[in-house]
Image (cartoon, rainbow, N blue to C red):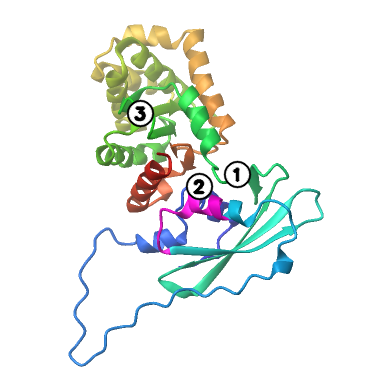
């Protein structure tokens, strides 16, 4: 495993999705096999030694905030799903920029004591954000603000449990190939967590997908006129026929998807052309932007955002289970 990755991938993926190289290394196989018994007379391999970090030097803790306890709470919120991951806060230092602190953390795996990574990030004066080559939420409850925002504003088509105690919110673009690839993963999650409340939010990336906004508008109207069940039939059909979302083929492809959903194509097309529908899609886009979503598909698990396709399913399932426990 290699920890020499950018802070963006280490924190945005490792902290937000908790899918650092440690997790990827543990999920390289989709099946497990029982190892062969050692040959007679061959001693069994010794248990891996626990990582030994250097003793922190008190001189490296010169900043008043964040405290070591807050950093540990943040890392536990982000990494606590993985019992193999261990860390130690090595330094919390003042910087020349007033109020901005530098945090240094050593990270390792119980299974590989020899490889220790150094994670470095900066914390803003208000203690609410960390800075690497991006700005990300920080604190003992780093995902709470996003969770509350989504509970209040994520108003797209939904399915699953009625309670928002466990809420999965996907921001997706109907013309995005990676979004199409993510749908079986989403379906699998909802099978494994049947009480989870799932919300689909449109995030058409018009700059690269010129038919995505129209597809989102049609979907919005299918849900409005025929309900959530019809919307998800429409979504499945639209993703399935994604290759035909072209300037010349989109109208027919979307009409076919509407028909498969049991809705009236002419009524849906008329609804999709209204200012109200345009405003609804734009509202979903603004919600994504306010949450700093900059790619699709993007999945929030109780406010914890992650690039769903970048996370092995076993790890994704661990994250959902951990968030359920954490947010009780």
Disc 3 from disc 2: Cα separation = 34 Å
120 to the left or right of 47? right
Crowding at mark 2 (Cα within 10 Å: few <14, some 14-19, many 20+): many
Please, what secondary structure does the residue beneath circle 3 have? helix
Residue 77 part of the magenta-drawn span: yes
Disc 3 from disc 1: Cα separation = 37 Å
Q: Between residues 251 and 110, which one lies in front from this camera angle?
A: 110
Q: Which mark is residue 25?
A: none
Q: Between residues 315 and 204, which one lies in front from this camera angle?
A: 315
Which residue was labeled with disc 1?
136
Q: Between residues 296 and 162, which one lies in front from this camera angle?
A: 162
Using the rendered image of the protein, determine whether residue 322 is visible from the camera's viewpoint. Answer: yes
Instruction: State yes or no: discs 1 and 2 in contact (Cβ < 8 Å).
Output: yes
Which residue was labeled with disc 3?
244
Quarter of the image for residue 240 reads: top left
Please, what secondary structure does the residue beneath circle 1 have? strand
Crowding at mark 1 (Cα within 10 Å: few <14, some 14-19, many 20+): some
Earlier residue among tags 1 and 2: 2
Bounds of the magenta segment: 72-84
Q: Between residues 150 and 265, which one lies in front from this camera angle?
A: 150
Give the main secondary structure, helix, strand or loop, of the magenta stretch: helix
- Percent x, y of residue 298: 46, 38
- Percent x, y of residue 108: 49, 67
Crowding at mark 3 (Cα within 10 Å: few <14, some 14-19, many 20+): some
* Above or below 7: residue 322: above
Please, what secondary structure does the residue beneath circle 2 have? loop
Which residue lies at the image location 48% right of the left edge and 41% below the top edge?
304
- Percent x, y of residue 133: 65, 50
Using the rendered image of the protein, determine whether residue 204 is visible from the camera's viewpoint. Answer: no
Which residue was labeled with disc 2?
16
Which residue lies at the image location 25% right of the left edge and 38% below the top edge?
191
């Amino acid at each position: 495993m290699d920890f020499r990755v950018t802070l963006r991938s280490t924190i945005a993926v490792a902290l937000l999705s908790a899918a650092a190289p440690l997790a990827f290394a543990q999920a390289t196989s989709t099946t497990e096999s029982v190892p062969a018994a050692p040959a007679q007379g061959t001693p069994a391999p010794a248990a891996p030694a626990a990582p030994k970090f250097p003793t922190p030097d008190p001189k490296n803790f010169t900043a008043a905030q964040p405290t070591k306890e807050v950093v540990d709470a943040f890392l536990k919120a982000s990494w606590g799903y993985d019992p193999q991951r261990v860390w130690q806060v090595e330094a919390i230092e003042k910087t020349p920029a007033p109020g901005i602190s530098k945090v240094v953390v050593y990270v390792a795996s119980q299974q590989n004591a020899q490889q220790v990574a150094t994670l470095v990030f900066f914390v803003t004066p208000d203690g609410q954000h960390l800075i690497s080559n991006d700005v990300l939420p920080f604190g003992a409850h780093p995902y709470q603000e996003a969770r509350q925002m989504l509970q209040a504003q994520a108003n797209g088509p939904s399915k699953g449990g009625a309670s928002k105690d466990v809420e999965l919110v996907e921001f997706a673009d109907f013309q995005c190939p990676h979004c199409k690839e993510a749908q079986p993963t989403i379906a699998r999650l909802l099978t494994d967590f049947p009480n989870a409340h799932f919300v689909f939010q449109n995030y058409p990336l018009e700059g690269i997908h010129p038919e995505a906004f129209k597809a989102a508008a049609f979907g919005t109207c299918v849900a409005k006129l025929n309900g959530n069940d019809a919307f998800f039939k429409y979504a499945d059909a639209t993703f399935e026929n994604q290759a035909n979302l072209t300037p010349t083929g989109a109208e027919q492809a979307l009409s076919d998807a509407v028909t498969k959903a049991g809705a009236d194509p002419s009524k849906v097309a008329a609804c999709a052309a209204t200012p109200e529908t345009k405003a609804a899609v734009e509202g979903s886009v603004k919600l994504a932007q306010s949450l700093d979503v900059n790619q699709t598909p993007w999945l929030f698990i109780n406010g914890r955002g992650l690039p769903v396709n970048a996370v092995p399913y076993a790890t994704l399932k661990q994250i959902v289970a951990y968030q359920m426990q954490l947010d009780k």
